[in-house]
Amino acid sequence: MTKATKLLTALPPPQRQHLMTLAREVSFPEDTRVFEAGGRADRFWVIRSGSVSLDQQVTTHQWVTVASLSAGDLLGWSWLFPPYRWDFGAEAFSPVRAYEFEAQPVLKLCEEDPALGLSLVRIVAEILAHRLEMTRGKLMEQYAIKRRGAF
């Protein structure tokens, strides 16, 4: 399995400093819904402390946690890809402190600084590949458990 990539530490220092000019410190109390699947994706966060669960609704009354994120992790990538809607929901599993970035100023900064834009897209792609691999493993585990229970 690939190692998780941390957005801010993966960016070269000058690009990180440039991006951080757009950061705003925020916090979420435990059990706060940060966003819902299908909602408008117009920002992202880098978690400073605490943990966030990414979830997917599978039935009317059932959600499945597909990932748990913690310090250094990127929360949200749907702001980067049309149709700019969240693919998952997110909930603070504990009190969370994070850096928040609004999508439009970040996208404008990436147009003005193409090297930053390319670095950011590559790092987000690495993060997505890792999360896809993790999600695939969780689905395989769930499938194996259900198959064993069927006998």
Image (cartoon, rainbow, N blue to C red):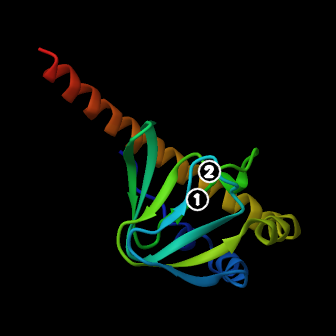
Identified at 14% across, 23% down, the residue is: 149
Spot the residue most to the front.
60
Q: Is residue 3 above or below residue 144?
A: below
Which of the marked residues, 1 or 2, is nearer the chain's N terminus? 1
Identified at 70% across, 77% down, the residue is: 19
Q: Which residue is mark 1?
A: 76
Dot label at residue 23: none
Q: Pointers 1 and 2 in contact (CB under 8 A)?
A: yes
Image position of 121 (left or right of 60) = right
Spot the residue most to the top.
151
The mark tally for this picture is 2
Q: Which residue is mark 2?
A: 86
Label 2 crowd bin: few (<14), some (14–19), many (20+), radius 10 Å: many
Kind of residue at badge 1 = Gly
Quadrant housing residue 121: bottom right
Identified at 74% across, 65% down, the residue is: 103
Quadrant housing residue 145: top left
Image position of 128 (left or right of 81) = left
